[in-house]
Image: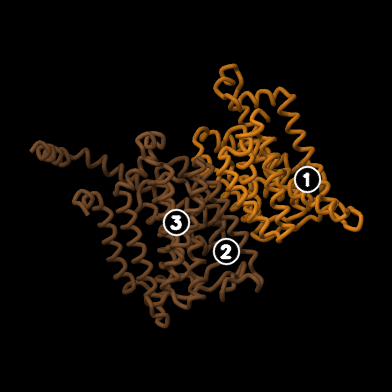
Chain colours: A orange, B brown
Amino acid sequence: MDLVVAVLFQLIYVIANLALISLGLAIIFGMMRVINLAHGEFLMLGGYTVVVATNMGINIWVSMLILAPLVVGIIGVIVERLLIRWLYGRMVDTLLATWGLSLLLVGIVTSIFGASTATTVSPPLGAVRIGAYSASGYELFLILITIALLVAVWMTLRFTKLGLLARGTMQNAEMASSLGVSTSRIYMITFGLGAAVSGLAGGLLAPMTGVLPTIGATYIAKAFITVISGGASILAGTAAGSVLLGGINGIFSFIAGSTFGEIALLLAAIILLRLMPRGITGRFFRKSL
Amino acid sequence: MSSGMLRQMRPTLVYALLGIVFMFAAPHVLQLFTIINLTTAIALAILALSLALIWGYGGILCFGQVAFFGLGAYVYTISAINIGGSTWAILIAVLLTSAFAAALGYFIFFGRVSDVYLGVITLTVTLIFFSLIRRTSGPEYKIGKALLGGFNGVSSPPINLPWDARTFLFPEQVFYVAMAALILCYVFAGWLVNTKFGRVCVSIRENELRSELLGYDVRLYKLGIFTIGAGIAAVGGVMFCNGVGRITPDVFNLYNAALTIIWVIVGGRGTLIGPAGATFALFYLTSALGGQSVLNNNLVLGVILIVFVLLVPKGVAPTVIDWVNRRRRKRPVRSRRRRRSRAEDAG
């Protein structure tokens, strides 16, 4: 029984982890059909924000939960104004430009902090006991905060004025703008919010993984697969993609080791896209957020 | 080959001839160190050529061309170690890589995945290769006699004379082989885009729906050019691991994937010589940047990519060709020639 709970806990953690690293990408993709190849670097910047802030003596919770999203969100808004807004409607060029941005950010961070791992921060929570087994308290915290984040995004989209305008823009940008919505501003805000969520995720993961200028590369493959498999709906897509792919990854990792877990994840995603080219939410839960 | 195709391929053949001259002149002029370095650049130019073919002519935005390049290098190395000779290993590398591309392409093109997703999927495949092979450092990860070696990679056996596994080629001879491979791939690609198959691919790039309504099976053509491109990339990979002497998982990293895209963007989509030339230029630029520590390579390449996407989206070669054509049109020679050709048409 304890074993079942421990394994289940691990499975849920893999799923939550996938959802956490993908959500920022999904917000930007779902809203404006922009695939942000600099997503991994937003996560990386979140991690560096936490490391730098805690080294300056700021409380780790403050730097993870407030500073990381704030800093990366501001960077996101700047990026949107300087780079992305010239390229709306040109998907391929946006991809290429954000890739350039990704290289640029890696380059800048390497120049400032050096190519090796910056001083790491340790996870601030101890272990939790599950019967005879113990699990990391920080992993439990990450699961809870991922759920909270998903709920917060849902509430924002469902119940606020901004969420209403954003959903309208998402469904029909031309109609929204002829009804007086400044779609350009909506895009700017969403891009900033997506970046902020990515920054928060990067900050939260920093104590688990340490930070490196090139750490973004380890996240983006999984984040892309999750978002694309999930489809265009921000929340339902992320949730469905993470549960399916995270579940497969977790199960195969448990049976055959983490290397096979990743192979299984990739194969599942490719077969899924052959069957549902528009992702899970392109076929099911179409009306969802 | 018909005379019409010969006329269309004239620029290709001229560049190929220049390449042959360079191939025989370079070892007499340049030092051995430069020649060895050049071999690596040539291998990368073959990679750029393969992407120029499938992106520039096929309209397939593949972010993971480097996956086929690296796969070719790994398959060559592993089979050369196991077989004990390079002849079959090269063949296996190209065929196996093409087969892998065909399988991946089947899922992509027959699933009608759109171009942007395609880029992301191929990139993801590349990154998965990267993280998988990095983890194979234990003695339990081996294929036949070849240890995969994880992060440190495998050292590649050098090319030998065909069916004579004891006569290895020296570095300057590998240079000849690589250069010959580049020229052959270049002429092959130049020929391919002028065949009916190539023209249909270009029409698909221009308007997929219209081509389909004209009765062409778009999926099959895309899969075809994608597979051929992967085969060419594998040739590049084989030359690369011969030039460097070993193959490491680093070929699959994000930086190299981006580099391939940058060569094609800078050189220009829709030409073959542009990306190949841009590869040499950027290879020497990044080598020169490696010697100093003020500007980081990533930073410079990122700026180059952003600047080209925003300001020179066509790339260098098409921009230059447009400029030359415009100038030529202004000269009266052109109009005389046109009048003559009109007379010929009439006659």
Mark 3 or 1, which is nearer the eye?
Answer: 3
Does A213 sit above or below residue B309?
A: below
Residue drawn 84% across the image and 53% down it: A4
Q: Chain of mark 3?
A: B
In the rendered structure, the answer to whether residue B321 lies left or right of residue B330 reads: right
Q: Nearer the viewer, residue B30 or B313?
A: B313
> In this orientation, does residue A213 appear?
no
Task: Kindly identify which residue carries mark 3.
Answer: B230
In the rendered structure, the answer to whether residue A197 lies left or right of residue B269 reads: right
In the rendered structure, the answer to whether residue B332 lies left or right of residue A21 reads: left
How crowded is the residue under tag 3: few (<14 C-alpha within 10 Å), some, or many (20+)?
many
Task: Kindly identify which residue carries mark 2.
Answer: B249
Secondary-structure class at tag 2: helix
Mark 3 or 2, which is nearer the eye?
Answer: 3
Does A167 sit above or below residue B83?
A: above
**How much space separates mark 3 and mark 1, taking CA atoms?**
44 Å
Does B345 sit above or below residue A5?
A: above
In the rendered structure, the answer to whether residue B332 lies left or right of residue B256 reads: left
Residue A158: percent from the left, percent from the top? 73, 26
> In this orientation, does residue B90 appear?
yes
